[in-house]
Structure formats: C-alpha cells, structure tokens
Image: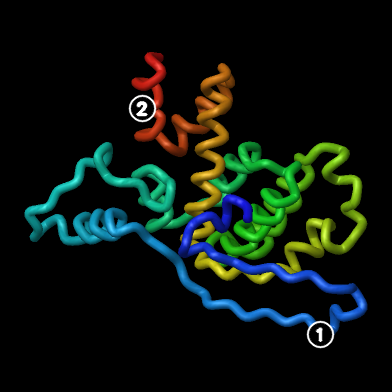
C-alpha cells in the first residue's frame, strides 16, 4: 500500500488479471472528500466573522488538507493556471506511483483551470521526467496524453488542488533546506505564511 492509501479514509483496492480479460474490467467508486474538523471550523469562522466571537488570524489558521492558510484561501477563491504551472517542478515525475497519482490530480483540477490547461500541465509535468522514466511513453498506460484521457478521478477538484499544493510545498521545503533559492521563491510566493514560519524554524 503506497502513501496515497495509508489512512482509513483513503483505502483502495487493486486487482490484476490477464490482458485477454481486459474487456471484462469494471470499477465502482464512491466520490467524496475528507476535510478536517479544524479546517471546517476555520472556514465557518471566516464566513461568519462579522457576527461571531471566533476570530482567526491568518498565521494561526489550521491547515486545509496539508496546505497552509494562503493555500486554503486560494482553493476557496479559485486556483489559477499560474499557480498550477509554478508547482509542477516540485512534483515527482519519475516514480510511476507518484506520477500516476499526480496525473490523476491534474485531471481532477480540470473543472477549476479548464480542460486544455490541465492537459497541457499534465504533458509539461510528464516531460520533466528522466529519460528512463519516459522510455515507455509510447505504451498506452505510460503515454501521458492517453493516461490523462482515460483516468477518471474520484476526488473533488478542491481536494485535488489541496493535494497538489501539499506535495509541491513539501518538496520545495526539502529543497529549501538544501539551499535551493528557486524553491524559496516558490514558497514565499504561494505559501507565504508557511514560508515565514519555515524561515523562523531554520533561523534565516
């Protein structure tokens, strides 16, 4: 079981059979998403701030599915193509499990950024892979365009956005700790509150 299914609410199953029986393949899914209680409380508090005694300062707002307060507000108000392209370099395109998961998330954000933009982002992301990772792209299950066309995400767009933001943020954080200035710019631009706390933690 990979890290995308390590929690109870993410359980998933996979069965394999001979290619000759592909025509008998089927699937069933139950679409939905999971939000933490803290995230829901903070969203409610921000909406009813004018008539509520609960007030959350941005730097103290709890994470929303792994993203900081700035990311949560971006998800609520709209996910821009600029942010999508900015996070692509911080998604792993070489490990197949990570690639297929990220490709699925990119397909899931199509309703937010538009199908053509999501497709192009998926192709650009795949092109960032190593020569070894792209060696079998001519095969259907590895061809980015074919994979994107065939995959049917079972998560809501907002959850997919949050997952992409979270993965990119974590990778950028790792690169910042190794002195990557471009990663620092990425975090400062798209995760400002998180980056501020990171700088304090690292003493920079």
Q: In the rendered image, is residue 117 in sight?
A: no
Name the mark nearer the viewer: 2 or 1: 1
Q: What element carries label 2?
A: helix
Q: Is residue 149 left or right of residue 203?
A: right
Tell me the tag on residue 187.
none
Give the spatial CA distance, label 2 vs label 1: 53 Å
Q: Earlier in the sequence, mark 2 or mark 1?
A: 1
Percent x, y for residue 55?
A: 14, 48
Quadrant of the image occupied by residue 28: bottom right
Mark 2 touches mark 1? (CB < 8 Å): no
Q: Which residue is drawn at 92% across and 56% down?
A: 138
Within 10 angstroms of label 1, few (less than 14), some, or many (20 or more) residues? few
Between 149 and 35, the residue placed more toward the observer is: 35
Q: In this view, does 144 lie above or below 149?
A: above
Percent x, y for residue 29?
A: 58, 77
Percent x, y for residue 34?
A: 42, 63
Q: Residue at x 42, y 52 (%)?
A: 65
Within 10 angstroms of label 2, few (less than 14), some, or many (20 or more) residues? some
Q: In which quarter of the image is the N terminus?
A: bottom right
Quadrant of the image occupied by residue 4: bottom right
Percent x, y for residue 193?
A: 35, 34
Q: What element carries label 1?
A: helix
Q: In this view, does 180 lie to the left or right of 62?
A: right
Q: Quadrant of the C terminus?
A: top left
Q: Residue at x 24, y 40 (%)?
A: 60
Tell me the tag on residue 196.
2
Q: How many labels does the image show?
A: 2
Q: Mark 1 points at which residue?
A: 24
Q: Is residue 112 left or right of residue 1?
A: left
């Amino acid at each position: 079981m990979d890290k995308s299914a390590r929690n109870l609410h993410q359980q998933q199953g996979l069965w394999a059979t001979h290619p000759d029986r592909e025509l008998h393949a089927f699937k069933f899914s139950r679409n939905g998403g999971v939000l933490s209680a803290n995230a829901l409380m903070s969203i409610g508090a921000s909406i009813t701030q004018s008539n509520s005694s609960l007030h959350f300062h941005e730097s103290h707002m709890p994470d929303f599915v792994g993203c900081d307060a700035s990311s949560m507000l971006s998800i609520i108000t709209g996910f821009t193509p600029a942010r999508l392209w900015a996070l692509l370099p911080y998604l792993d395109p070489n490990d197949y499990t990570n690639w297929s998961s990220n490709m699925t998330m990119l397909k899931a954000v199509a309703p937010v950024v538009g199908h053509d933009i999501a497709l192009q982002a998926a192709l650009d992301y795949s092109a960032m892979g190593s020569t070894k990772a792209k060696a079998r792209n001519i095969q259907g299950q590895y061809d980015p365009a074919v994979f994107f066309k065939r995959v049917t995400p079972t998560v809501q767009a907002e959850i997919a956005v949050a997952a992409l933001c979270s993965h990119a943020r974590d990778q950028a954080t790792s690169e910042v700790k190794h002195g990557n200035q471009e990663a620092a710019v990425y975090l400062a631009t798209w995760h400002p509150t998180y980056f501020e706390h990171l700088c304090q933690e690292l003493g920079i």
